[in-house]
């Protein structure tokens, strides 16, 4: 691990996601989980207690079955991605 590495994400703290993007953010959160799970399953992982050696992870379940805490992890990822897009000057239009 590089002890000198200091992450410097784009500051999106001043960006408020418009209400009309809340459904998109939730759909993205679900898709983030689906992409992650598909990758794990393709690599031979199965559902079970967290064990990297046995390639088991308790979150290899449908998004709807995740705890709210786990869903919030994916929600933060999707919301920050949308805020990053807006911070870069792009518009999101349906």
Image (cartoon, rainbow, N blue to C red):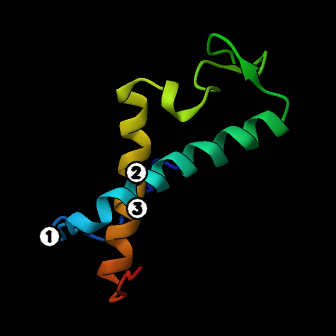
Percent x, y for residue 47? 70, 18
Q: Residue at x 51, y 24 (%)?
A: 65
Which residue in the protein does label 2 denote?
A: 26
Kindly state the secondary structure of the residue where label 3 is placed. Answer: helix
Q: From mark 2 to mark 3, how far is it between C-alphas?
A: 5 Å
User: Mark number for residue 1?
Assistant: none
Label 1 Cα crowd, 10 Å radius (few <14 / some 14-19 / many 20+): few
User: Residue shown at 78%/26% (left/top)?
Assistant: 45
Residue at image point 40% right, 51% down? 26
Image quarter for residue 50?
top right
Q: Residues within 10 Å of mark 2 (few under 14, many from 20)?
A: some
Vertical side of 5 occupied by 30: above or below? above
User: Considering the numbered disc 1 on the image, is that residue within a helix, a strand or a loop?
Assistant: loop
Q: Nearer the viewer, residue 10 or 82?
A: 82
Task: Compare residues 61 and 57 and report the one nearer the observer.
Answer: 61
Q: Quadrant of residue 62?
A: top right
Residue 83's place in the image compared with 67, above or below, is: below
Instruction: Give the farthest residue toward the top.
Output: 49
Helix, strand or loop for disc 2: helix
Nearest to N terminus: mark 1 or mark 2: 1
The relative height of residue 92 versus residue 63 in the rendered view (above or below) is: below
Q: Which residue is mark 1?
A: 14
Residue 24 is labelled as 3
Q: Which residue corresponds to the image point at 40% horizontal and 40% vertical from the top-left?
A: 73
Residue most extreme to the bottom? 89
User: Left of 27 or right of it: where is 83?
Assistant: left
Label 2 with label 3: CB-CB less than 8 Å: yes
Q: Which mark is in front, 1 or 2?
A: 2
Q: Earlier in the sequence, mark 1 or mark 3?
A: 1
């Amino acid at each position: 691990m590089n002890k000198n590495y200091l992450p410097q994400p784009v500051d999106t703290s001043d960006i408020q996601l418009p209400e009309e993007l809340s459904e998109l953010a939730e759909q993205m959160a679900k898709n983030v989980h689906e992409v992650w799970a598909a990758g794990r399953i393709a690599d031979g992982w199965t559902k079970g207690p967290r064990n990297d050696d046995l390639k088991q992870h308790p979150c290899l379940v449908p998004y709807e079955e995740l705890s709210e805490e786990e869903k919030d992890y994916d929600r933060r990822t999707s919301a920050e991605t949308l805020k990053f897009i807006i911070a870069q000057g792009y518009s999101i239009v349906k």
